[in-house]
Image (cartoon, rainbow, N blue to C red):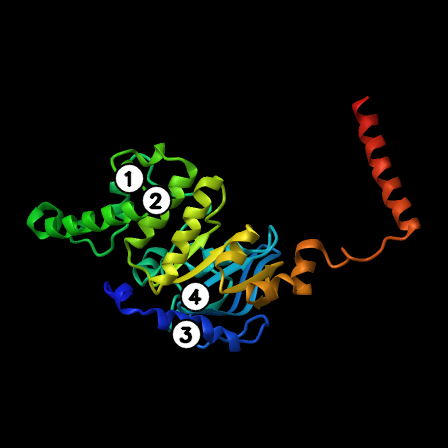
Amino acid sequence: MPADATTTTGAGDLSAARKALQDVPHEPGAPKPDPILVADDIVRQFGGLTAVDVKHFEVQRGVITALIGPNGAGKTTFFNLLTGFDRPSSGSWAFNGTSLNKVAAYKVSRMGMVRTFQLTKVLSKLTVIENMRVGATKQRGEGLFSAMFAPLWRSQESANTKRADALLERFLLIKKREDFAGSLSGGQRKLLEMARALMADPELVMLDEPMAGVNPALKQSLLGHVKSLRDEGRTVLFVEHDMDMVRDISDWVVVMAQGQIVAEGPPDSVMSNQSVIDAYLGSHHDQDISEDLEEKILAEAQAEIDHEEDHRG
């Protein structure tokens, strides 16, 4: 995203991006009017296990998309594949029309697609402001030769520091500026990781379970920050188990189960989708259990308890 994109993207454009989803079919792999990320036939196998098998996937530009599913559905693995932290067994995917096949994760970030992690990746022995400076891209002082000549990079570092301070103010971390990142709470680390991601001025921000381990006091703050990313004209794709958060901020929801996309649509539509209910609760969760079957289940459970007690004795 250009540096001035947040000022040139109007509310009307943002509203149009969300309204465009109204005509998108509520079905797996549905094509979007203006996709920023497209993936086809992505398969990831670990030995004989197929962890991900996604036929087609698109992320609409300028909206917040949630990727949900039960534990073990393949969400984080899919995230890793899209961002270059893992390689698929087969398939193709592109960001802004540019193929990401065999593109290293750091190059994906430089292209404008950054991610955070479920387990935060702050640099614990660096201060908060140093963590922020690390997130800036195209730094002239990174080269061996240029690093020896401060006039070549000093002005850029000063500009990066001003930008970092502005983000720390925005994420309510400015008072922690000189503290070591390792001293921050879990929620503060989440905020720092999100703020650091914005130092790269990304078009697409990918958040892996941003609410995991965050106390209720910081939850609303994080929710507001995620919404503000969309309001700036950025695109957000996030993995989350907190269904209240998904309902609150998502424009579109994609559901994975057993490595595949089983449903797509607006939050309310997806939450009432039978495929989603089955994915979370099991396909026979709403069937009546006969007396004979109930007695059999109870007998098997009691036999297992008796067996364990015999072994203990």
Of residue 252 and residue 280, the one placed in the foreground of this image is 252
Residue located 36% across and 62% down the image: 231
Mark 3 neighbour class, 10 Å CA radius: few under 14, some 14 to 19, many 20 or more: few
User: Given contact means CB atoms under 8 Å apart, are the residues at marks 1 and 3 in contact?
Assistant: no
Front of the two marks 3 and 2: 3
Circle 2 residues within 10 Å: few <14, some 14–19, many ≥20: many
Give the mark, 1 or 4, whose residue is nearer the N terminus. 4
Instruction: Place residue 100 in its image quadrant.
Output: bottom left
User: In what element is the residue under mark 1?
Assistant: helix
Q: CA distance from mark 3 to mark 2?
A: 31 Å
Rounded to the nearest whole Å, what is the CA distance between mark 2 and mark 4? 23 Å
Instruction: Name the residue beneath numbered marker 1.
Output: 128
Type of the residue with mark 4: Val
Q: Is residue 17 visible in the rendered structure shown here?
A: yes
Residue at label 4? Answer: 63
Q: CA distance from mark 4 to mark 3?
A: 10 Å
| Contact, mark 2 vs mark 1 (Cβ under 8 Å) | yes
Residue 253, image x, y percentages: 54, 63
Looking at the figure, which quarter contains the C terminus?
top right
Check disc 2 and report the residue beneath it: 192
Q: Is residue 271 left or right of residue 118?
A: right
CA gap, disc 2 to disc 1? 8 Å
Residue at which label 3 appears? 16
Mark 2 falls on what kind of element?
helix
